[in-house]
Image (cartoon, coloured by chain):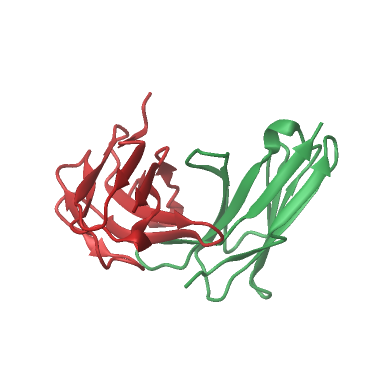
Protein backbone atom coordinates (compact mmCIF):
# COMPACT_ATOMS: atom_id res chain seq x y z
CA UNK A 1 0.00 0.00 0.00
CA UNK A 2 1.25 3.50 -0.77
CA UNK A 3 1.83 5.85 2.11
CA UNK A 4 2.06 8.99 0.02
CA UNK A 5 -0.26 10.17 -2.70
CA UNK A 6 0.64 13.03 -4.99
CA UNK A 7 -1.75 15.52 -6.48
CA UNK A 8 -2.11 16.36 -9.30
CA UNK A 9 -1.15 13.26 -11.28
CA UNK A 10 0.00 15.47 -14.15
CA UNK A 11 0.87 19.12 -14.58
CA UNK A 12 1.65 21.08 -17.73
CA UNK A 13 3.11 24.58 -17.49
CA UNK A 14 5.20 27.02 -19.50
CA UNK A 15 8.76 28.02 -18.78
CA UNK A 16 8.97 30.68 -16.14
CA UNK A 17 5.80 29.63 -14.34
CA UNK A 18 5.75 28.02 -10.92
CA UNK A 19 4.81 24.38 -10.42
CA UNK A 20 3.16 23.18 -7.23
CA UNK A 21 2.44 19.59 -6.31
CA UNK A 22 1.08 18.10 -3.13
CA UNK A 23 1.62 14.92 -1.18
CA UNK A 24 -0.67 13.44 1.43
CA UNK A 25 0.26 10.57 3.70
CA UNK A 26 -1.47 8.41 6.27
CA UNK A 27 0.75 7.71 9.29
CA UNK A 28 3.19 9.63 11.46
CA UNK A 29 6.57 10.14 9.86
CA UNK A 30 10.19 10.87 10.79
CA UNK A 31 10.80 12.76 7.58
CA UNK A 32 9.44 13.27 4.08
CA UNK A 33 11.56 13.40 0.95
CA UNK A 34 11.02 14.48 -2.62
CA UNK A 35 12.68 12.75 -5.57
CA UNK A 36 12.79 13.54 -9.30
CA UNK A 37 12.81 10.98 -12.10
CA UNK A 38 13.67 11.94 -15.62
CA UNK A 39 12.26 9.73 -18.35
CA UNK A 40 14.06 6.40 -18.48
CA UNK A 41 16.27 7.18 -15.50
CA UNK A 42 16.50 6.35 -11.82
CA UNK A 43 15.22 8.60 -9.05
CA UNK A 44 17.31 11.46 -7.77
CA UNK A 45 16.93 12.88 -4.27
CA UNK A 46 15.91 16.54 -4.17
CA UNK A 47 15.15 17.54 -0.60
CA UNK A 48 14.38 16.11 2.83
CA UNK A 49 12.20 17.76 5.45
CA UNK A 50 12.06 16.46 9.01
CA UNK A 51 8.84 16.08 10.96
CA UNK A 52 9.75 19.03 13.22
CA UNK A 53 10.36 21.36 10.28
CA UNK A 54 7.67 23.35 8.50
CA UNK A 55 9.49 24.72 5.47
CA UNK A 56 12.72 24.12 3.64
CA UNK A 57 14.37 25.67 0.60
CA UNK A 58 16.94 24.41 -1.86
CA UNK A 59 17.66 26.62 -4.85
CA UNK A 60 14.38 26.98 -6.77
CA UNK A 61 12.68 24.35 -4.63
CA UNK A 62 10.49 25.08 -1.63
CA UNK A 63 8.98 22.31 0.46
CA UNK A 64 6.42 22.70 3.19
CA UNK A 65 5.23 20.13 5.68
CA UNK A 66 2.02 20.20 7.73
CA UNK A 67 2.06 17.24 10.08
CA UNK A 68 -1.38 18.08 11.47
CA UNK A 69 -2.85 17.64 7.98
CA UNK A 70 -0.37 14.92 7.02
CA UNK A 71 0.53 16.76 3.86
CA UNK A 72 3.47 18.31 2.07
CA UNK A 73 3.89 20.50 -0.97
CA UNK A 74 6.74 20.98 -3.41
CA UNK A 75 7.02 24.29 -5.24
CA UNK A 76 9.36 24.73 -8.17
CA UNK A 77 9.77 28.40 -8.98
CA UNK A 78 10.61 29.83 -12.42
CA UNK A 79 10.31 26.45 -14.14
CA UNK A 80 12.66 25.45 -16.94
CA UNK A 81 12.25 22.87 -19.69
CA UNK A 82 14.86 20.80 -17.85
CA UNK A 83 12.43 20.48 -14.90
CA UNK A 84 10.28 18.18 -17.06
CA UNK A 85 10.18 14.97 -15.01
CA UNK A 86 8.11 12.95 -12.59
CA UNK A 87 8.26 13.99 -8.96
CA UNK A 88 7.71 11.58 -6.09
CA UNK A 89 7.24 12.09 -2.41
CA UNK A 90 8.56 9.42 -0.07
CA UNK A 91 7.82 9.06 3.60
CA UNK A 92 10.04 7.59 6.26
CA UNK A 93 7.65 6.29 8.88
CA UNK A 94 10.34 4.92 11.14
CA UNK A 95 10.11 1.29 10.05
CA UNK A 96 13.87 0.89 10.31
CA UNK A 97 14.25 3.56 7.67
CA UNK A 98 12.36 2.15 4.73
CA UNK A 99 10.74 4.68 2.42
CA UNK A 100 7.25 4.48 0.96
CA UNK A 101 6.77 6.24 -2.35
CA UNK A 102 3.72 7.82 -3.87
CA UNK A 103 2.64 7.34 -7.47
CA UNK A 104 4.19 10.63 -8.58
CA UNK A 105 3.29 13.85 -10.37
CA UNK A 106 4.30 14.10 -14.02
CA UNK A 107 5.41 17.65 -14.82
CA UNK A 108 5.85 18.93 -18.36
CA UNK A 109 7.44 22.35 -18.85
CA UNK A 110 7.12 23.72 -22.38
CA UNK A 111 9.50 26.39 -23.74
CA UNK B 1 31.90 8.31 -9.87
CA UNK B 2 29.62 5.38 -10.74
CA UNK B 3 27.26 5.41 -7.74
CA UNK B 4 24.79 2.54 -8.17
CA UNK B 5 25.26 0.33 -11.21
CA UNK B 6 22.63 -2.12 -12.44
CA UNK B 7 22.98 -4.80 -15.07
CA UNK B 8 21.48 -5.62 -17.46
CA UNK B 9 19.65 -2.50 -18.64
CA UNK B 10 17.09 -4.46 -20.65
CA UNK B 11 15.97 -8.09 -20.60
CA UNK B 12 13.27 -10.13 -22.27
CA UNK B 13 12.36 -13.48 -20.71
CA UNK B 14 9.91 -16.21 -21.50
CA UNK B 15 7.52 -17.36 -18.80
CA UNK B 16 9.27 -19.83 -16.52
CA UNK B 17 12.81 -18.69 -17.28
CA UNK B 18 15.08 -17.53 -14.50
CA UNK B 19 17.47 -14.63 -14.28
CA UNK B 20 19.48 -12.57 -11.83
CA UNK B 21 19.57 -8.79 -11.76
CA UNK B 22 22.87 -7.43 -10.53
CA UNK B 23 23.45 -4.29 -8.49
CA UNK B 24 26.67 -2.79 -7.17
CA UNK B 25 27.37 0.45 -5.30
CA UNK B 26 30.69 2.17 -4.72
CA UNK B 27 29.62 4.60 -1.99
CA UNK B 28 30.40 2.29 0.94
CA UNK B 29 26.74 2.27 1.94
CA UNK B 30 25.52 -0.30 4.42
CA UNK B 31 21.93 -0.52 3.18
CA UNK B 32 20.65 -1.63 -0.19
CA UNK B 33 17.18 -2.04 -1.70
CA UNK B 34 15.32 -3.52 -4.63
CA UNK B 35 12.16 -1.83 -5.95
CA UNK B 36 9.85 -2.40 -8.84
CA UNK B 37 8.08 0.41 -10.65
CA UNK B 38 4.85 -0.14 -12.53
CA UNK B 39 2.82 2.52 -14.35
CA UNK B 40 0.79 4.63 -11.93
CA UNK B 41 2.05 2.67 -8.91
CA UNK B 42 5.16 4.49 -7.81
CA UNK B 43 7.94 2.34 -6.40
CA UNK B 44 7.24 -0.75 -4.32
CA UNK B 45 9.90 -2.31 -2.14
CA UNK B 46 10.68 -5.94 -2.96
CA UNK B 47 13.55 -6.73 -0.59
CA UNK B 48 16.09 -4.76 1.36
CA UNK B 49 19.34 -5.37 3.16
CA UNK B 50 20.04 -3.21 6.18
CA UNK B 51 23.66 -4.35 6.31
CA UNK B 52 25.96 -6.96 4.87
CA UNK B 53 24.71 -10.41 5.82
CA UNK B 54 21.09 -9.46 6.40
CA UNK B 55 18.09 -9.37 4.07
CA UNK B 56 14.40 -8.77 4.72
CA UNK B 57 11.18 -8.82 2.78
CA UNK B 58 9.57 -5.64 1.62
CA UNK B 59 6.06 -5.01 0.38
CA UNK B 60 6.04 -7.36 -2.67
CA UNK B 61 8.59 -10.17 -2.14
CA UNK B 62 6.68 -13.10 -3.69
CA UNK B 63 8.45 -14.61 -6.68
CA UNK B 64 11.83 -13.08 -5.85
CA UNK B 65 14.95 -13.95 -3.90
CA UNK B 66 17.93 -11.80 -3.02
CA UNK B 67 21.55 -12.23 -2.07
CA UNK B 68 23.73 -9.66 -0.35
CA UNK B 69 26.99 -10.96 -1.76
CA UNK B 70 29.18 -8.43 0.06
CA UNK B 71 28.91 -4.81 1.11
CA UNK B 72 28.96 -3.61 -2.51
CA UNK B 73 26.66 -6.07 -4.24
CA UNK B 74 23.00 -6.98 -3.87
CA UNK B 75 21.39 -9.24 -6.46
CA UNK B 76 17.74 -10.00 -7.20
CA UNK B 77 16.76 -13.39 -8.63
CA UNK B 78 13.60 -14.40 -10.43
CA UNK B 79 13.46 -18.20 -10.24
CA UNK B 80 10.50 -18.71 -12.58
CA UNK B 81 9.50 -15.50 -14.31
CA UNK B 82 5.83 -14.66 -14.78
CA UNK B 83 4.22 -11.98 -16.99
CA UNK B 84 3.16 -10.16 -13.79
CA UNK B 85 6.86 -9.52 -13.14
CA UNK B 86 7.14 -7.34 -16.24
CA UNK B 87 8.31 -4.10 -14.72
CA UNK B 88 11.19 -1.70 -14.29
CA UNK B 89 13.46 -2.73 -11.43
CA UNK B 90 15.53 -0.27 -9.45
CA UNK B 91 18.31 -0.89 -7.01
CA UNK B 92 19.13 1.76 -4.40
CA UNK B 93 21.56 2.22 -1.55
CA UNK B 94 21.79 4.45 1.49
CA UNK B 95 23.83 5.06 4.60
CA UNK B 96 22.49 3.43 7.74
CA UNK B 97 21.25 6.71 9.15
CA UNK B 98 17.65 6.39 10.22
CA UNK B 99 17.46 10.16 10.63
CA UNK B 100 18.50 10.73 7.05
CA UNK B 101 17.62 7.78 4.85
CA UNK B 102 18.48 9.39 1.51
CA UNK B 103 18.55 6.77 -1.18
CA UNK B 104 20.68 6.71 -4.32
CA UNK B 105 19.24 4.88 -7.30
CA UNK B 106 20.60 3.00 -10.25
CA UNK B 107 19.33 3.60 -13.79
CA UNK B 108 17.02 0.59 -13.71
CA UNK B 109 16.51 -2.72 -15.49
CA UNK B 110 13.58 -2.93 -17.88
CA UNK B 111 12.25 -6.48 -17.81
CA UNK B 112 9.61 -7.95 -20.07
CA UNK B 113 8.25 -11.44 -19.43
CA UNK B 114 6.40 -12.94 -22.38
Quadrant where the image shows the C terminus of chain A = top right
Picture coordinates of residue B89 (x, y %)?
38, 49
Q: In the figure, is residue B6 to the left or right of A63?
A: left
Q: Which residue is more in the foreground, B22 or B1?
A: B22
Picture coordinates of residue B53 (x, y %)?
14, 53
Which residue does the image show at 40% across and 41% down from the upper left? B108
Q: Extreme top residue here?
A: B1
Task: Examine the image and state in which quarter residue A110 appears.
Answer: top right
Q: In the figure, is residue A78 to the left or right of A4?
A: right
Which residue does the image show at 47% across and 73% down from the upper left? A1
Chain B, colour shown: red
Q: In the figure, is residue B18 to the left or right of B37?
A: left
Q: Is residue A85 above or below residue B55?
A: above
Task: Let me know if residue B107 appears in the view.
Answer: yes
Picture coordinates of residue A35 (x, y %)?
56, 48
Picture coordinates of residue B10 (x, y %)?
36, 38
Which residue does the image show at 76% across and 53% down from the upper left? A20
Chain in green in the render: A
Task: Examine the image and state in which quarter residue A96 appears.
Answer: bottom left
Q: Which residue is more in the foreground, A86 or B19?
A: B19
Q: Which residue is more in the foreground, A18 or A72?
A: A18
Which residue does the image show at 39% across and 57% down from the upper left? B98
Task: Let me know if residue A66 appears in the view.
Answer: no
Task: Examine the image and state in which quarter residue A61 appears.
Answer: top right
Amino acid sequence: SQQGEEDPQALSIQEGENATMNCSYKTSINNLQWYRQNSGRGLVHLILIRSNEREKHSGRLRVTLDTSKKSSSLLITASRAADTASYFCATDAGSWGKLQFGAGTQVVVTP
Amino acid sequence: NAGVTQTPKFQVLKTGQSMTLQCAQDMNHNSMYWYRQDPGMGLRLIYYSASEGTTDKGEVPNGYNVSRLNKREFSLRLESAAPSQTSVYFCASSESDIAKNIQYFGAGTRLSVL
